[in-house]
Amino acid sequence: MASATAALILSAGASTRFGGQPKALLPVDGRSGVRRIAEICLADGFDPVTVVVGAHHHLIAHELRGLSVDTVDVENWSEGRTASVQAGLAAVPPERDVLLWPVDHPFVAGRTVDALLAARETDLIGVWFIPTYQGRGGHPVLWRPPVRNDIFDLRPDAPIRSLLPEFGPQVRRLPVDDPGVVANVDTPEEYQAAARQWDDAEVV
């Protein structure tokens, strides 16, 4: 059940490769990417829905006005993405599973979130669920509490994927028909390519 799962939306970076324009505010499906992600999570019943902000915290908080989301302002966001994840996790009840959705993957279909939840419900061993498209792993990912505990032991600049070998067979890779899971919009060119792909497909 999504109601027993927290959603953590990662939106703390400076978007330097966009010239400082917040990626979170790029339009996706008639609204900003960060608002679309938050609305999907709220509609699915995630509780709480927490948005981690940093460099553009005022702009993003304003964009989310009217939505029942919490924001966590990370002062040390520049130390690395893991620092932002750690700050967000600290605000989430420790017994909750967590959906981590970085805002630079705004074109993910809502059905992919549903597929991750369904996979979690039928798998009692897996603790880390990763959607894949054409063999490539992407986002959002779904974690059970054992993953959370190990993330807190990482350095702020250490990649979270470095924990994957530790969990071995408890890492589940879920093939999905959704190119949005690997559409990482770090640059204007990547955003434009993902937007064209979105326009060419029927995304739900």
Image (cartoon, rainbow, N blue to C red):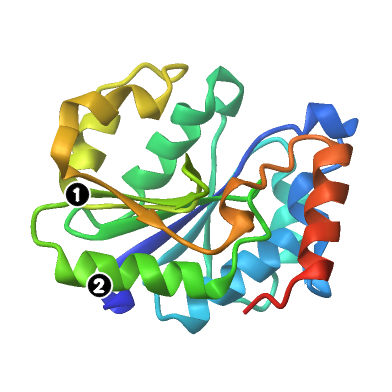
Residue 15 visible (yes or no): yes
Q: Which residue lies furthest to the front in this view?
A: 134
Q: Name the residue under label 2.
A: 4
Q: Can residue 68 be seen in this view?
A: no
Residue 96 location, x and y as percent? 23, 60
Report the amino acid beneath label 2. Answer: Ala
* Residue that extends furthest to the left in the rendered view of this protein: 124
Residue visible at 68% across and 60% down in the picture: 107
Give the SS element for disc 2.
Answer: helix
Q: Position of residue 160 (x, y in %)?
A: 38, 28
Q: Nearer the viewer, residue 107 or 82?
A: 107
Q: What residue type is labelled 1?
A: Val
- Image side of residue 103 versus residue 134, left or right: right
Q: How far apart are marks 1 and 2 (CA)?
A: 15 Å
Q: Which residue is drawn at 38% across and 28% down?
A: 161
Q: Specify the quadrant of the image occupied by residue 55.
A: top right
Number of residues whose C-alpha sits closer than 10 Å to that of mark 2, classed few (under 14), some (14–19) or many (20 or more): few
Query: Image check: 28 left or right of 130?
Result: right
Q: Is residue 69 left or right of residue 126?
A: right
At 74% across and 71% down in the image, what residue appears?
Answer: 201
Q: Residue at x 67, y 47 (%)?
A: 183
Which type of secondary structure does the marked residue at label 1 adopt?
loop
Q: How many labels does the image show?
A: 2
Residue that numbered label 1 is attached to = 127
Can you tell which quarter of the image residue 15 is in? top right
Instruction: Write down the quadrant of residue 48 in the picture.
Output: bottom left
User: Which of marks 2 and 1 precedes in the sequence?
Assistant: 2
Figure quadrant of the C terminus: bottom right
- Location of residue 97 with respect to 46 vertically, above or below: above
The quadrant of the picture occupied by the N terminus is: bottom left
Image-based side of 41 in relation to 94, left or right = right
Q: Nearer the viewer, residue 98 or 117?
A: 117
